[in-house]
Amino acid sequence: MIWNDSRFRALLFQALALAGVIAFSIFLINNTLNNLERRGIATGFDFLGSTAGFGIITYLIDYSEESTYGRAFLVGLLNTLLVSVLGIILSTVIGLLVGLARLSSNWLLARLAALYVEMFRNVPLLLQLFFWYFAILLPLPSPRNAFQWGEIFFLNNRGIYGPKPIWESGFGVALWVLVIGVVAVVLMCRWARRRREATGRPFPTGPVSLVILVGFPLTAFVATGSPLSWKIPKLQGFNFAGGLVIIPEFIALLLALSVYTASFIAEIFRAGIQSVPAGQTEAAYSLGLKPGQTVRLIIVPQALRVIIPPLTSQYLNLTKNSSLAVAIAYPELVSVFMGTVLNQTGQAVEVIAITMAVYLGISLTISLLMNWYNRRIALVDR
Amino acid sequence: MRQIATLVISLVLSLCLGGGRAHGGSTLDGVKAKGFVRCGVHHPGLPGFSNPDDKGRWVGIDVDVCRALAAAIFGDAKKVKFRPVSAKERFTALQSGEIDVLSSNTTWTLIRDSALGLDFAGVIFYDGQGFMVRKNLKVKSALELSGASVCVITGTTTELNLGDYFRANKMKYSPVVFGNTDEAVAAYDAGRCDAFTTDRSGLAAVRIKLARSGDHLVLPEIISKEPLGPAVRHGDNRWGDVVRWTLNAMVTGEEKGVTSRNVDAMKAKSTDPQVRRLLGVEGDLGAKLELTNHWAYWLIKQVGNYGEVYARNVGPDTPLKLERGLNQLWNKGGLLYAPPMR
């Protein structure tokens, strides 16, 4: 009897469960649509094409009041990605430094690092956000009394102002030389490693990379007649105008996210490094490796296996925590889309569904990247 | 986060349960059966409109609308439960049946009346959006605000009006958009913005909260029409009628000089047929609304007429110090005009 085949039964039950889930989903969606229609509430995604009409303070792609809700969504999404990517980089750097400092044999440094971790790890993120914003950034002087450095950089309670680069025609040449240089350096490093593994002869990748990445593009830039000018911010009426501005809401959010997440990352790095037995270091030394080589070739590869999985979670947390920005007026996805757009269109189901899908998408992408990296560095059974 | 959680939960509940109330007939029957009105009011508190006082009791114009409703239905203004709803979640709370009526400083607009599945029962307060600036900026008109940073609260019609106004006058601005009034006010007070914008009644309320309220000035321009009033679910006409005529009864009460103090005397002695009909001495207006004939008597007795409610909450003798302006009776130069009660 086919019933007695355990594999068949397993498949059957899985198929039934799947069918049940699909049927339930269809029921939910249908029910939602029916009820929305019966109550005369508009449905559908057409609203993304209509004019938004509201302004956004900072955007990475062109945006004005005449733009559509769809465009506003993109602006919010890019702002979320910007703060998340920078936050991930900054928190990793701070976390690494603090983590190493905690392991330092210097008593004061180790205690200071421990103090950092305990302080920032144990205060709610929202409070830290308010602290950076209301206690550090907003008490800065007004635009008319701004701090300034050489008439170029200005700092006041409306943000940091600096010169804005204006690309002129011909700048693309230098940019292309740089892109080609990056590819060349990657290829060169691979080749150098293979040669070292095969023959044992080292190759000076450092200085050569420097020439390719900085020297060549700079030469191309000068050769094409320095096609770049700067627009200096000037005080006009109420505010500085004309230059590049980083609004205090962004700075506060970036600092709060980085400093908070770094306290967790520091502990992850410390745990990772301490998970490598001291015998490994001693063995490396007795093989004649220098301390730098020991760290790079022996300790870090083994520590990373412990570090990467929890680090992934921290990156995901940081990205999702960026939605707290709604409290301090940084126009990221939740603030722009689930705030303003949701309220103006009233299409809660669609807006929330899109927002959830976006966060899910970002998180899954980070997970995939980190898992791929984790597989690469995982201990290979030989 | 709490408000978003509520939003999602109310959404999910409403969708999963298929909206039991939508089948069960009028909200009026539901309210009578459960014995109280569940009324959505402004969160966070908005002085003069809906704000808990020092004893934790809700006070304000929006709150008094809810009490008047309870008085009209049950003869007891206390039979109301308040549910603070934020600007973001308020419409979902009403759509999903979590509240019976939304009385939360809400502007009556075409989209809300149509696409959001709401019906506005009337206007309790005629407002308009304005700007507040520091006096030391020496700005005398909103038209001088080009290039300014403007603090604004999200989830309202305010953002759109702001965009429209600057766009129409070809001026640049930086909108600094906060999720909550408290943070927006704190940021403005700290100098993050040159101007703060919201409805003028809101500006009056915000000014009280500022560290040195005398240093700030409300500019003369009114850049939008903001008729604020209670809303009910679309299609629930019987319930909508009750809310609409509760408002009208308050206005008619003032027009006819019926106050909470003299209402007993008026009921006993008045010979004016309109007053006699209003207070249920003659005719059966209450029955037409499926209420008792004492409905308007109760609501004026327990809550007061429009003028009393206005004076108590936002009038010149309150911290908000708002003149009647547009919110005066039609025969005194304002816009309040209740259709005839007969």
Image: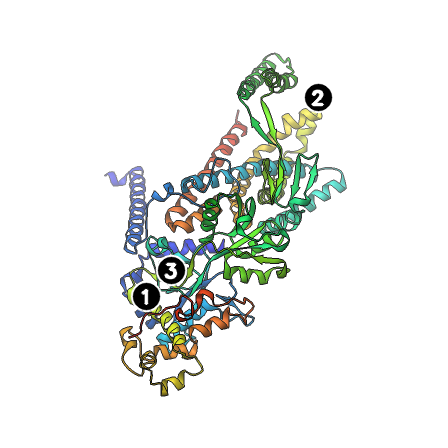
Question: Which of label 1 and label 3 is nearer to you?
Answer: 1
The kind of residue on which mark 3 rests is Leu
Give the residue at x 59% y 61%.
B209
State the image quarter where residue B253 is shown.
bottom left
The chain letter under disc 3 is B
The kind of residue on which mark 1 rests is Gly
Residue A80 horizontal/vertical position (percent): 51, 40
Name the one closer to the observer, B256 or A284.
B256
Q: Is label 3 in a helix, a strand or a loop?
A: helix
Q: Residue furthest bottom?
A: B269
Discs 2, 1 touching: Cβ within 8 Å? no
Neighbor class of circle 2 (other Cα within 10 Å; few <14, some 14-19, many 20+) is few
Residue B189 horizontal/vertical position (percent): 61, 55
- Left/right of residue B47 with respect to residue A143 in the rendered view: left
* Residue position for label 1: B240
The numbered dot on residue B94 is: 3
Of the residues under marks 1 and 3, which one precedes in the sequence?
Answer: 3
